[in-house]
Image (cartoon, grey):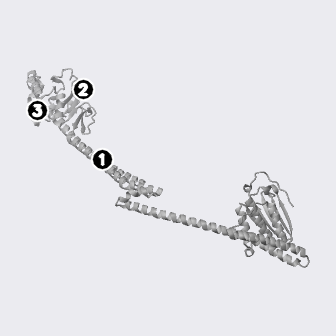
Amino acid sequence: MKLATRLALLFGVLASIFLGALTFLHAAQQRSAAKLRTEIANDKARQLARLVALSGNTLERFAADYTQWDEMCAFVLSHDPAWATINLEQSVASWGFHGVWVFDAARREIYRHQRAPFTAADLAAIPSAPLFARLCGTDRLHFFANSPRGLVEVRTAPIHPSDENRNGEPPRGWFMVARLWDEAQFAQLGTLTDSQVSLAPLPGASDPAMVETSQTLHDWSGQPLLRLTLRHTSPLLANMIAYDATEVALFLAFGLAFLGVATWFVHRWVHHPLRRIEASLQTGDPALAAPLQANRDEFGRIATLIRTAAAQRETLRREIADRTAAEQELRRTFAARAALGRDLHDGVIQSIYATGMTLQGAGQLIYDEPREAQRRLSTCVETLNRTITQLRSYIAGLEAPATPPVALADGLQRLLHEMHAARPVEYDVQVDPLLAAALPQDTIVQLLFIAREAVSNALRHSQATHIALGLDTAAGEPAFTVEDDGCGFDPGDAAGRGHGLDNMTRRAEEIGASLTLESVAGRGTRVRVELPWSGLESDRSVSTTSTP
């Protein structure tokens, strides 16, 4: 993994940790805000419940005062309107109530009074028949009801004499008082709770500091009638949310600043020097890392090491180049010496071998055939003169003398004429003239050397009586062969293997050919050189012919 990737991964991990911490902080702040919001909502709910209960208590006290009263019992019997005007209508107005009803023991309505804004028609349905059945009992009821003018709060109580000990007697009648929840009532609740209070759903609020709670108002049967909604904007919650937002913003700004500064310093102190060092090492140019040498840190020491290594590498390169040149020169010298040895072995030494065998034959003919002996001696002299000339050329130039251009057939005839003087055997030469004409001169020279070595081996070692030389394409590929009918030998016997066979193999390889040696004890020897078509100088088709 590259260092840049590792640094990116490190900063990714740091960013993930930072985001995780920021998320945890924000979640903790949200939990704290939610807890505070819940506490404020519960407090406002308790305030609203107490105020609603307090509103009902005034009705309850009024109803208790007027139902536990002997005069009210007398009014139920007398139906005196003057007494009702003085004691009921004026009291309802002073207490801020809006309606009062009185029923006798026979459950008949004997008195009803509605104060503005109510009219007789507004409260005509109060009480309803089911409510009236529930009203005329011993329970004291507290409930809410709808009216054309709005929400109405109602209290009921049975009428008894002033003596509380007589409360166990049947009621003398029943009493009901009502109050309208008008805008002033809701405004008073809002002022007391520092909130907005309404029966209708309040419009949606986007303020996160807004707290909303509600209380259910029930009808006479205990069923939910309406919901009283309270919405409060808490300064404490607003300050807490603003503080939390500021804290998150500062934390985020600090984290981004830290990552930005850390990234800049890592790029300046680590990534940029590494890029210079990498480029210097890739291109091999120590100048790219040279500006880092003035730094008193690890990168400065590395840059110095790069400069030192570059100087050592240049010295080593020059030394390697010098040694390579010397090695190549030495190889050329060894190759020249090997070639010179092959040429001496295949040329001069074979000529000397042939001369030796010719002298042996001439010595046997001196007395019986003096003329033939004289001819062979002349041939030996000519051969020795040519050998001396070759040796002088080797000594003068320490390399094989340049061979004059010669045709393959002519070279073979001259070679066989020289060898025939050493030992008379039957020779058979078959050369395809078109194929021979297409051979390069280097190939002809190497084939003549191979032929000289093969014929010399046949004359000296195999006691052959017939030697055949040929150049043809009988097997589909151009090939040069030397075959004798001598005693043969085992090619796998390394003890009897001299330089001649290795020299023939190397000469074949130098012209891109391959040499195969086939020999069986008692059945002669066959040397075959398979030539490549690509080594021929002519692209014309070659047919096989025989030349005796």
Do callouts 2 and 3 mark residues in contact (Cβ within 8 Å)?
A: no
Name the disc covering residue 57, or none. none
The x and y percentages for residue 343 are: 72, 68
The x and y percentages for residue 533 are: 74, 55
Crowd rating for badge 1 (residues with CA inside 10 Å; few <14, some 14–19, many 20+): some
Name the disc covering residue 65, or none. 3
Write down the residue under mark 1. 252
Q: Is residue 378 above or below residue 183?
A: below
Q: Nearer the viewer, residue 74 or 113?
A: 113
Q: Is residue 241 above or below residue 352?
A: above
Q: Dot 1 lies on which element? A: helix
| Identity of the residue drawn at 8% across and 24% down | 86
Instruction: Give the distance between the C-alpha atoms of the residues marked 3 and 1, in whole angstroms.
Output: 67 Å
Q: Quadrant of residue 334?
A: bottom right
Do callouts 2 and 1 mark residues in contact (Cβ within 8 Å)?
A: no
Name the disc covering residue 129, or none. 2
Q: Quadrant of residue 336?
A: bottom right
Q: Dot 3 lies on which element? A: helix
Q: Nearer the viewer, residue 367 or 215?
A: 367
- Report whether residue 527 is seen: yes
In front of the other: label 3 or label 1? Answer: 1
